[in-house]
Image (cartoon, helix red, strand yellow):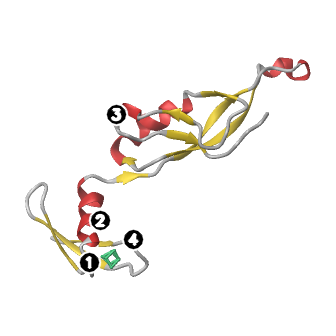
Amino acid sequence: MSEELICITCPLGCHLTIERKGDDELLVSGNRCPRGVKYANEELLSPKRMVTATARVLRLPQESQADSLGLVARLPVRSTGAYPKETVGDLLQAIYALEVPVPVKRGTVLISNFKGSGVDVIASRTLLE
Ligand code: SF4
């Protein structure tokens, strides 16, 4: 039984037809270039996703905010590369456990090389206070 995918590597959006030959071999047709085969293999055999989320921001409590414990906002963050889809939950848990002190600059690495994946998590924006 064949599977269908649309290659999103370029705007042509080729309609790929894929047949599995064993556990880790695919027969791909419908692609206009070799990148379609690569896309099908990545998507069906080891899917990855870019990750975007928000992290808790740790502010120094000011007198007027004394009862807020200094935790008042969230910072948009993103992965620097695609992370294996099946364990994205682990990465999200690590992001949600962060407490990012401000000020923080856009691009600051908040998590480095998560679980040896080569993927970092960085601040998506600058937050001065
Ligand atoms: S198979 Fe090649 S030409 Fe077709 S959408 Fe993918 S990258 Fe573009």
Dividing the image into 4 quarters, which one contains the C terminus? top right
Closer to the camera: disc 1 or disc 4? 1
Report x, y in % for residue 56: 65, 32
Query: On the image, which quarter does residue 98 sit in?
Result: top right
Residue annotated with mark 3 = 116
Disc with the residue nearer the chain's start (3 vs 2): 2
Disc with the residue nearer the chain's start (4 vs 2): 4
Indicate yes or no: mark 4 CB to ligand 1 under 8 Å: yes
* CA separation in Å, label 1 and label 2: 11 Å
Residue annotated with mark 2 = 39
Disc with the residue nearer the chain's start (1 vs 4): 4
* CA separation in Å, label 4 and label 2: 8 Å
Q: Please tell me the numbered disc located at residue 8.
A: 4
| Residue 25 in the figure: left or right of residue 37 | left
* CA separation in Å, label 1 and label 4: 12 Å
Q: Tell me which amino acid carries mark 4.
A: Ile
Report x, y in % for residue 84: 34, 46
Disc with the residue nearer the chain's start (4 vs 3): 4
Say if mark 4 contacts mark 2, CB within 8 Å. yes
Q: Tell me which amino acid carries mark 1.
A: Cys
Q: Residues within 10 Å of mark 2 (few under 14, many from 20)?
A: many
**SS label for mark 1:** loop
**SS label for mark 3:** helix
Q: Tell me which amino acid carries mark 2.
A: Tyr
Disc with the residue nearer the chain's start (1 vs 3): 1
Report x, y in % for residue 106: 64, 43
Query: What residue is drawn where x is 40% and y is 74%?
Result: 10
Q: Please tell me the numbered disc located at residue 18.
A: none
Residue annotated with mark 1 = 33
Closer to the camera: disc 4 or disc 3? 3
Dividing the image into 4 quarters, which one contains the N terminus? bottom left
* CA separation in Å, label 4 and label 3: 27 Å
